[in-house]
Image: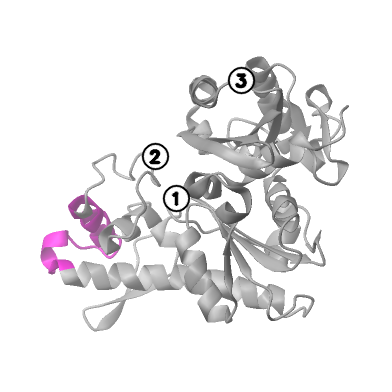
Amino acid sequence: MASIGWDIGGAHLKAARAENGRIVAAAEAPTPLWQGLDSLDVAFEALKARLGPAEVHGVTMSGELCDAFATRRDGVVGLAAIAAAHLGAPRLYAGAAGFVAIDSAAEHAARVASANWRATAEAAALSVPDGLLLDIGSTTTDLIPIVAGKVAFFGEDDAGRLAAGELVYTGLTRSFVMAMAPRAPFAGQWTPLMNEYFASAADVRRVLGDLPDGADLLATADGRDKSPAASRARLARMIGREATDAPDAAWQRLAAWFAETQLRDICDAAFVRLSRGDLDPRAPVIAAGAGEQLAGEIARRLHRPLQNFADLTGGGAEASVCAPAAAVALLVACAPML
């Protein structure tokens, strides 16, 4: 049986196709929902054409937080209705309640909202009984321990997860540089940052030359191109300068510092969560997401082995980038029928 999992985010729609318990294809499309919901209709049709038909569809989401909806409940109901319009009768992932009928979105809204992290962890737990799932996406990072084959979370909603160190609002591409630190080292001294959205984490990675192909699907802060030179110019604005004020090497050093601050934020959250002492010190870091390569460095700092989510599910790098969609595709295929 073929199944397709869908993850409706605020910035991207992700989809993954499973056959015989393995991911065989995965893809994503940009959907900046804060600009309107029309992009979601276009993305559903494009990804449906790419992944083909399936006997069952599963849906998870985090896009209910976008500005298009007044409340999370409204967002869950609205996004579920859009999914139903394109997929017929998909099943909705509702955390502890499992998969529920799409027309019961309002009833289960609290459990459906931003539950995609739990789906990823449940899928990982099928193969790795003990580990720290580290899903570094475009916008956020999820840190979820798996202990004795169970998802060992302390925070279930966003507020609880932020407090527990299980959710960090930093990601590979969409994070605002102004949110990474209040100041930065440049030309031998500390300089405050402009508190403006002049540059993103994607610019940092482009300057460093390690942004994965296809990782940045959205427009830049200034609407200009995505060349390293344009990224240097955007980064320079963060400290009130022009790119021509210093050699390229100076901007690379600045970018390296911002990348380091991001890694420290994630590591700090990991140390907070691991301080509870419930995870075996030999358990691996399970790396997933668009920032999967960053998880390797964090595993090294935590002195833990590394396990790639894509190796657990198949599908290669695309399955890792689309980890919640891949997880839902696998989970819905073996979920009890409604």
Q: Which mark is residue 53?
A: 3
Q: Earlier in the sequence, mark 1 or mark 3?
A: 3
Local crowd at mark 1 within 10 Å, few (<14), some, or many (≥20)?
many
- Distance between the Cα atoms at labels 1 and 3? 31 Å
Question: Is 19 or 175 nearer to us in this picture?
Answer: 19
Amino acid type, label 2:
Leu
Question: Is 119 or 224 nearer to us in this picture?
Answer: 119
Q: Earlier in the sequence, mark 3 or mark 2?
A: 3
The colour scheme is one colour
Q: Which residue is mark 2?
A: 218
Residue 215 position, x and y percent, is 40, 47
Q: Are marks 2 and 1 in contact (CB under 8 Å)?
A: yes
Residue 158 position, x and y percent, is 70, 53
Q: Which mark is residue 174?
A: 1
- Residue found at x 59% / y 30%: 68
Query: Number of marks in the image?
Result: 3
Q: Judge left or right: residue 331 versus residue 171.
A: right
Does residue 200 show up? no
